[in-house]
Amino acid sequence: MTEILLATLNARYAHASLGLRYLRANLGEWRESSAIREFVIGQKTEDIVEKLLAEGPRIIGIGVYIWNVEESTRLVAQLKAVSPETIIVLGGPEVSFEIDEQRICNLADHVITGWGDVSFAALVRQLMAGETAPGKVIAGVQAPLPAIVSPYAEYTDEDVRQRHLYVEASRGCPFKCEFCLSALDKTAWPFPLEAFLADLEALYARGARQFKFVDRTFNLKVDTSMAILGFFLDKLESAPGDPVFVHFELIPDHLPERLREMITRFPQGTLQFEIGIQSFNADVQARVSRRQKNDVAAANLAWLREQTHAHLHVDLIAGLPGESVASFAAGFDRLVGLAPHEIQFGILKRLRGAPIARHTAEFGLRFNPDPPYNILATDAVDFQAMQRLSRFSRYWDIVANSGRYSRSLPLLLGASPFANFLAFADWLYAETGQTHALAQERLVHLVHAYLCLERGLPEAQAGAALLADYRATGGRSRLRFEVDDGRRIAPRKAARTATPARQARHLES
């Protein structure tokens, strides 16, 4: 019987919880009496309850996040209904603020706010010794990073083979962007570099080839960035046929020359940079305390696109206080002109505890009261317009970001990318009433119909582009508009690579 279970509901199986692994690694003498049990959102709650209680735990620690809080609430309610003697301890960003307002916190025995690495272990020791806990709500102790036991040995061989491995070279963020919980940090704290590189070496030796860094500001300390990039570059150069894929989050306006030089040495399909632009409107940036040199950021994006093989995933946020649709459209078109591989069109969310809430009254912010707390309207963007933007975001992801329409997308965007894609999104929703569950063959035919009937493009031009896109990404069915002249473009078989499939499609186009 396992006395302590650490559990969470991940968004997908491929996502392995780094937080749970930190907790187990730091349990000290209780580590061997503990186990990690991960589930996926959408699983039946009763089945999860049954699996957890079958192990007879005395304590269950549950990681709670914006994507799983509703299902986690049902989980905790059922656990306490069936086994009230089992002690439930919550942690995670979703339960670190506004605790009194949340049903899940009322149901649980204890809630640890903030950092839980050492505070959960301290609570376990007290509970197992029969001592009185310090209270229901426990403020997590921010231990010095060298005192925190590394979590990476907690990744199993199955994790290494089949899942994304999350790693962090630092915690915290020195910037104060009000839409982000990292705005509450005082600074960024680095983990000891030598020990971290040793952890990477151990993971690599076990077969890990995909690494996702969760650092908010990977290129803040360039010496550290260089050392970590050098680690992966050495691996690539010593075994050129052995693929590696690494994801970093970059500050867009900080790219010194020596860092540039190293980035240019990475081959295609190995680096992905997530770059937060969020808005190109200087007034909006100042309003939400975001410091960004827009011209420098744009120049760096252009350089990365033109001079390196890095895959660029760039973020924009719609619904920021005071930003109109026209302002957002101008920023979107500017970003499209810089040609990143993906534009993550996000909708503003009111994360619990984030300072963005201070603008609610002045700018008429109306948020969804339930997760994911997305913005529904502002004084500059009414509800109907926000709905259109939300659908734009979804369709952009499945058409543009998917990498499936590299030849057809320019036909959709034309000279006015935002306006033209918004018109397409409006038409697509009117035709289907759907933003999800659009089969690939159906979507190809819908894009073809739109280009020909609504945009007036020659059928041969639209058909040739769409057919080439469809075949290049593995489509095998005969399309209705396919010319019956015996010519077929054979689907391509993907080469062995560590690059995730969506990014690989961008590289093939």
Image (cartoon, grey):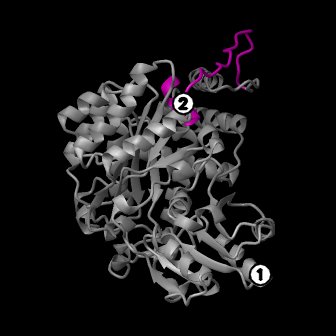
Q: Categorize mark 2 by other alpha carbons within 10 Å: few (<14), some (14-19), many (20+).
A: some
Residue 236's image quarter? Answer: top left
Question: Which amino acid is tagged 1?
Answer: Ser
Q: Is residue 192 left or right of residue 286?
A: right
Q: Amino acid at mark 2?
A: Ala
Out of 169 and 470, give the one closest to the viewer. 169
The magenta stretch is: 481-509
The numbered mark, 1 or 2, whose residue comes first in the sequence reads 1
Number of other residues with Cα within 10 Å of mark 1, as a class: few under 14, some 14 to 19, many 20 or more: few
Q: Any mark on residue 83, and which?
A: 1
Residue nearer the viewer, 169 or 273: 169
Which percent across, then down, holds residue 76?
68, 77
What residue would you read off at disc 2?
Answer: 498
Q: Position of residue 368 (x, y in %)?
A: 53, 74
Q: Residue at 76%, 25% (x, y): give it.
A: 477
Q: Are marks 1 and 2 in contact (CB under 8 Å)?
A: no
Q: CA distance from mark 1 to mark 2?
A: 44 Å
Q: Is residue 508 magenta?
A: yes
Which quarter of the image is occupied by the N terminus?
A: bottom right
Q: Is residue 34 visible?
A: no
Q: Quadrant of residue 115?
A: bottom left
Q: Position of residue 353 (x, y in %)?
A: 41, 76
Element at label 2: loop
Q: Main secondary structure of the magenta part?
A: loop
Residue occupying image coordinates x 64% and y 40%: 162
Eye-nearest disc, 1 or 2: 1
Residue 306, relative to residue 438: is it above or below? above
Q: Is residue 429 visible?
A: yes
Q: Is residue 35 left or right of residue 45?
A: left
Q: Residue at x 42, y 27 (%)?
A: 235
The answer to which quarter of the image holds residue 489 is top right
